[in-house]
Image (cartoon, helix red, strand yellow):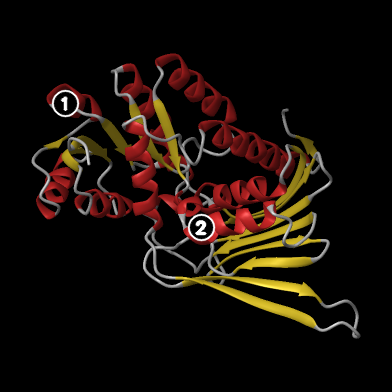
Amino acid sequence: MGDVLSFGLVGCGSQSEQHANVVEATEDAELVGCADVDVERATEFSAEHDIPAAYGSLEELIASESLDGVIIAAVPTAHPDLVTTAIKAGIGAVLCEKPMVVPGEAERARELRSLARDADAVLVEGLMYRHHPQIRRARSLVAEGKIGEVKYIHGQFSDYYNADGDNWRNDADLGGGSMGAKGCYMIDACNVFAGASPVEAVCRETRDEEFDVEIGETGTVVYENGVTAQFETNHRSVWREELKICGTEGVLIVPHAIVTTSQPREIELQMGGAYEHEPRKHEVIEFDPVNSYARQFENFLACVRGEEEPLVPISDSVTNYEVADALLHSTETDQVEQVPS
């Protein structure tokens, strides 16, 4: 174990609880300050989590504390400016909650990537699910050819109706909508398991009349190697967070792929099963409870120390937003759109 590293947390809403709890449980890291545009909320948050200082802005936090890194968990529309402020102020490591930029603004993601590279800073988007052992094992199984050659991917991330007008997911001005809340996970998962670059996309959208925000996306992405991926997001249906990767010899299913913090998880393999004459073989691989946010922070901490590379490289995030741009553009043009190479 090395020296204890100091971090600041920006944004003191509900999502910040996950990050604060993880840092508190890490022996060689500490939160020395938190910041929020609502300084009273920051003060209350600092008291709840025994954080020494609270501030009304990221600028005040950076000016007052010696930081090894910053965790950003504000509303999505604030993320790009906060990342920019941190890196330009000399902060060498930034973990930014998803969505790093509002879907539809891939150019901003490219700008942040360039900014981080020019400053030799670590910039990681909080796609925490990738750090869970079940996803890492699923990737290994697919890479090893366990289900043969991947041909089709399906993802679904949906949840129940939320009528809270103060929830950022219901406010387009704050980056709300199902694409930013859930679609970014689905796009990333499809990109991860496809094994090739995305080339074109088409999407259909559902909107909420009360809040005038999109609440559902049904998208298709086609890849250079011929893999087709389809995903659904919805803020008005039953909770599901499932991935299904279909190959020439079998299917790999991750029943609970995204929110993985405290419950046992599993991967199901379904092999064979042609027509009626070939019995389908089932194999279940089980995983003990693991907090994916904790695993994410472990990797981030190792990156700060120069011991590891980000498990979610910033180039992956940029590709995700380029796909999101094509999908959202498709909802406007009613046509298949090309994804920038």
Disc 2 versus disc 1: nearer the observer: 1
In the rendered image, which quarter contains the C terminus?
A: top right
Residue kind at label 2, given as amino acid type: Glu
Between residue 246 and residue 331, name the one nearer to us: 246
| Above/below status of 145 relative to 159 | above
**Which residue is painted at 48% across and 59% down in the image?**
133
- Does any portion of residue 213 appear in the rendered image? no
Query: How far from the left and from the top, in percent, is residue 27?
Result: 19, 48
What distance separates the C-alpha of mark 2 from that of mark 1?
45 Å
Q: Is residue 30 left or right of residue 165?
A: left
Query: How far from the left and from the top, in percent, is residue 59?
Result: 22, 24
- Does any portion of residue 123 appear in the rendered image? yes
Q: On the image, numbered disc 1 is attached to which residue?
A: 66
| Above/below status of 84 relative to 183 | above
**Which residue is painted at 76% across and 43% down in the image?**
201
**Which residue is painted at 19% across and 51% down in the image?**
24
Q: What secondary structure is found at the residue carrying circle 2?
A: loop
Q: Is residue 13 left or right of residue 234?
A: left
Q: What secondary structure is found at the residue carrying circle 1?
A: loop
Q: Around disc 1, counting alpha carbons within 10 Å, would you say few (fewer than 14), some (14 to 19), or many (20 or more)?
A: some
Q: On the image, numbered disc 2 is attached to which residue?
A: 210
Query: How far from the left and from the top, in percent, is residue 89?
Result: 28, 18
Residue extending farthest top: 118
Between residue 292 and residue 139, name the one nearer to us: 139
Q: Is residue 318 left or right of residue 128?
A: right
In the rendered image, which quarter contains the N terminus?
A: top left
When asked about the image quadrant of residue 92, the answer is top left
Residue kind at label 1, given as amino acid type: Ser
Q: Is residue 8 left or right of residue 233?
A: left
Query: How far from the left and from the top, in percent, is residue 121?
Result: 39, 23
